[in-house]
C-alpha cells in the first residue's frame, strides 16, 4: 500500500471520527448544579408548564408557533428554564437558567413537562427537512433531558402533532389513528400495539404519582362478530400495556341481554383523582335502532383501586341530559357546567336538578380546596374565588389577583405549591404567577432580547 493511499485512509478515518463525534454531541451542553435534589426527589405539578422539584422550579418560559426554529441550543422563549426558590417560595433573582433549549409544545400550543427519576420528559416539533426540502409540518419528537441539562435523548418520533399522549412511570403512551402505543423510555422500543379501533381516550395524569398514575381509559367497539352493535366497552390499561381490564360492557347492568334498556353506549367526559380513588365522569345512551339513540344521562363512578371493580348500585346519577364541557370536582360534589351567563353544579345529592352557583359572563378556571376560581369569559384580567359550600349565603367572592391580561385560547391555569401559573394573553405570551393567598403577579421566566426591545420601542412611540 503506497503512502498516498495510506494518507487518504487516515484522513477518511479522522473525518468519520469527527462526524461521529458531532452526531454524539448533537445535544451536548454543560450541566448545571442540582444541589439538594436527586433522582428520587418527587416532583410537584407534573403535566403542566411549571413543575417544582425540591427547591427548583422547572417551567416552559412562554409560547411560540410550531414553525419557529427548533435547532437544539437556539430556542429561548418556549424552552424549559429553571429558577431557584427561596424557603418562602419566592423566586431568587438571577437564578434563571435554560435547561432544555428546545421549543416545548405540540400543534395545540399546550406545553407540558413531566419529571421522573432525574429526567424531564416533553414533546417538541420536528422540523427536519422533507424530501422536497421544506421543514416538516407533522412530525413530533418525544424527548427527555436530565434535570441538570447535561444529557438529552430522542425517545421516538411520530407523524402527528395532535395525537393524545402521556408520560408516566418511565413510559410514553399515545393514541395515533385509533391505535394505542406504549414505549419504554429506557429501551426506546415501541411495544406491540396495546389495542386498536379506539374512540375516546382519557389519560390519567396524576401529578402526585398515585396508584392510578399512568392508566389509560378508553372506549372501543366490541370485538365479537355481531353485526348490529347496541353497546360499546370501557377498557382500563396500564401505561406499559401489561395490565388490562374491560370495565364496562353489555352485561355491566343486566344479565338479560334482551333487556336493552340496561345496555348502553358510553361517552367519556373526564376524571378526578381523589384521595380514596379515581372518579370517572361519563354519559350513557340506549341504542333504539339504526343510529338512533336515547340519552340516559350523565353519571360518575368512583373506582377504589386499580382492579377497576364496578358495582352499578354505587353509580351516581348527575343529570338526565348528556352534559359536555364539564369541570370535574369530585364524586360527592359532581361537576360544574357553564351555560349562557351562568355556571351550574350537578351532583347526585341534588336529584339531577342543576344548581346555579355563579351568574354573569364568567369562565371557571379550576376548583381547589372547596373553592371555585374564575375569571371574565372575555378579555380576562382578574382571578376571583368563592367557597362552593357558601353559595346562596350571601358570601362575597374574593379577588385573588389582577393581571394585564390572561391567556385563554388553548391555555389553562395551573396551581403548584400555592401559586397559580398562567400565560399572559397579550402579544408576548410569557409565563406569570401569583400566590393564591393574594399577591402581585410576577414574570416567572426571562424575556428574549427581541421582545424586550419590542416592548421598549412600543413605549417610546
Image (cartoon, helix red, strand yellow):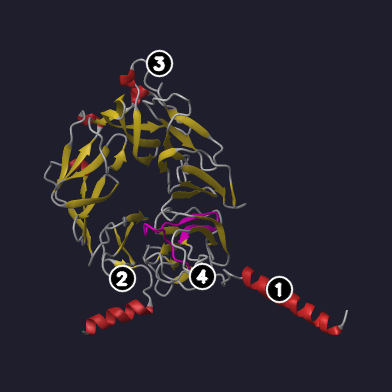
Query: The C terminus is located in which quarter?
Result: bottom left
Instruction: Tell me if mark 2 has few (under 14), some (14-19) or many (20+) residues whose alpha carbon lies within 10 angstroms of its own.
Output: some
Name the residue nearer the viewer: 38 or 358.
358
User: Which dot marks residue 16?
Assistant: 1
How crowded is the residue under tag 4: few (<14 C-alpha within 10 Å), some, or many (20+)? some
Q: Percent x, y for residue 180?
A: 49, 43
Residue furthest front as drawn: 132
Could you tell whether 175 is left or right of 151 in the image? Answer: left
Q: Does residue 418 appear in the picture of this structure? A: no
Point out residue 392 in the picture as x, y percentages from the top left corner.
Answer: 13, 41
Sequence-earlier tag: 2 or 1: 1
Q: Kindly report which numbered mark, 4 or 1, lies closer to the viewer in this rendering.
A: 1
Q: Residue furthest right?
A: 1
Mark 1 or mark 3: whose residue is earlier in sequence: 1
Q: On the image, numbered disc 4 is attached to which residue?
A: 72
Q: Give the camera-side residue of 283 and 232.
A: 232
Asked whether disc 3 touches disc 2, contact meaning CB atoms under 8 Å apart, the reply is: no
Amino acid at each position: 500500500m503506497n503512502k498516498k493511499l495510506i494518507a487518504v485512509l487516515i484522513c477518511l478515518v479522522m473525518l468519520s471520527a469527527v462526524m461521529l463525534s458531532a452526531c454524539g454531541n448533537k445535544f451536548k451542553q454543560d450541566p448545571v448544579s442540582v444541589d439538594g435534589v436527586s433522582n428520587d426527589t418527587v416532583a410537584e405539578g407534573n403535566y403542566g408548564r411549571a413543575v417544582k422539584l425540591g427547591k427548583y422550579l422547572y417551567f416552559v418560559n412562554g409560547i411560540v408557533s410550531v414553525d419557529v426554529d427548533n435547532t437544539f441550543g437556539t430556542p429561548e422563549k418556549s424552552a424549559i428554564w429553571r429558577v431557584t426558590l427561596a424557603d418562602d417560595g419566592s423566586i431568587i433573582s438571577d437564578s434563571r437558567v435554560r435547561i432544555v433549549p428546545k421549543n416545548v409544545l405540540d400543534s395545540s400550543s399546550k406545553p407540558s413537562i413531566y419529571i421522573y427519576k432525574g429526567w424531564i420528559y416533553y414533546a417538541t416539533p420536528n422540523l427536519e427537512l422533507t424530501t422536497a426540502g421544506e421543514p416538516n409540518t407533522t412530525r413530533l419528537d418525544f424527548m427527555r433531558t436530565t434535570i441538570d441539562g447535561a444529557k438529552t435523548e430522542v425517545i421516538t418520533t411520530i407523524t402527528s402533532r395532535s395525537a393524545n399522549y402521556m408520560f408516566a412511570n418511565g413510559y410514553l403512551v399515545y393514541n395515533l389513528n385509533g391505535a394505542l402505543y406504549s414505549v419504554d423510555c429506557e429501551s426506546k422500543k415501541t411495544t406491540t400495539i396495546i389495542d386498536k379501533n379506539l374512540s375516546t381516550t382519557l389519560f390519567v395524569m396524576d401529578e402526585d404519582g398515585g396508584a392510578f398514575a399512568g392508566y389509560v381509559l378508553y372506549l372501543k367497539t366490541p370485538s365479537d362478530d355481531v353485526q348490529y352493535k347496541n353497546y360499546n366497552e370501557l377498557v382500563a390499561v396500564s401505561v406499559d400495556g401489561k395490565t388490562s381490564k374491560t370495565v364496562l360492557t353489555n352485561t355491566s347492568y343486566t344479565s338479560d341481554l334482551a333487556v336493552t334498556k340496561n345496555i348502553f353506549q358510553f361517552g367519556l367526559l373526564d376524571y378526578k383523582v381523589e384521595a380514596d380513588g379515581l372518579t370517572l365522569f361519563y354519559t350513557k345512551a340506549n341504542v333504539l335502532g339504526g343510529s338512533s339513540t336515547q340519552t340516559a344521562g350523565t353519571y360518575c363512578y368512583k373506582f377504589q383501586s386499580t382492579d377497576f371493580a364496578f358495582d352499578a348500585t354505587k353509580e351516581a346519577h348527575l343529570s338526565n341530559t348528556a352534559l359536555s364541557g364539564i369541570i370535574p370536582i369530585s364524586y360527592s360534589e359532581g361537576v360544574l357546567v357553564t351555560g349562557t351567563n351562568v355556571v351550574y353544579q350537578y351532583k347526585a345529592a341534588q336529584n339531577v336538578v342543576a344548581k346555579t352557583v355563579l351568574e354573569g359572563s364568567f369562565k371557571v378556571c379550576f376548583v381547589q380546596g372547596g373553592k371555585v376560581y374564575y375569571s371574565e369569559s372575555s378579555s380576562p384580567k382578574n382571578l376571583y374565588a368563592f367557597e362552593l359550600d357558601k353559595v346562596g349565603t350571601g358570601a362575597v367572592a374574593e379577588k385573588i389577583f389582577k393581571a394585564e391580561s390572561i391567556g385563554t385560547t388553548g391555555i389553562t391555569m395551573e396551581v403548584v405549591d400555592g401559586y397559580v401559573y398562567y400565560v399572559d394573553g397579550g402579544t408576548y405570551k410569557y409565563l406569570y404567577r401569583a400566590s393564591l393567598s393574594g399577591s402581585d403577579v410576577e414574570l416567572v421566566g426571562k424575556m428574549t432580547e427581541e421582545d424586550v426591545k419590542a416592548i421598549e420601542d412600543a413605549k417610546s412611540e
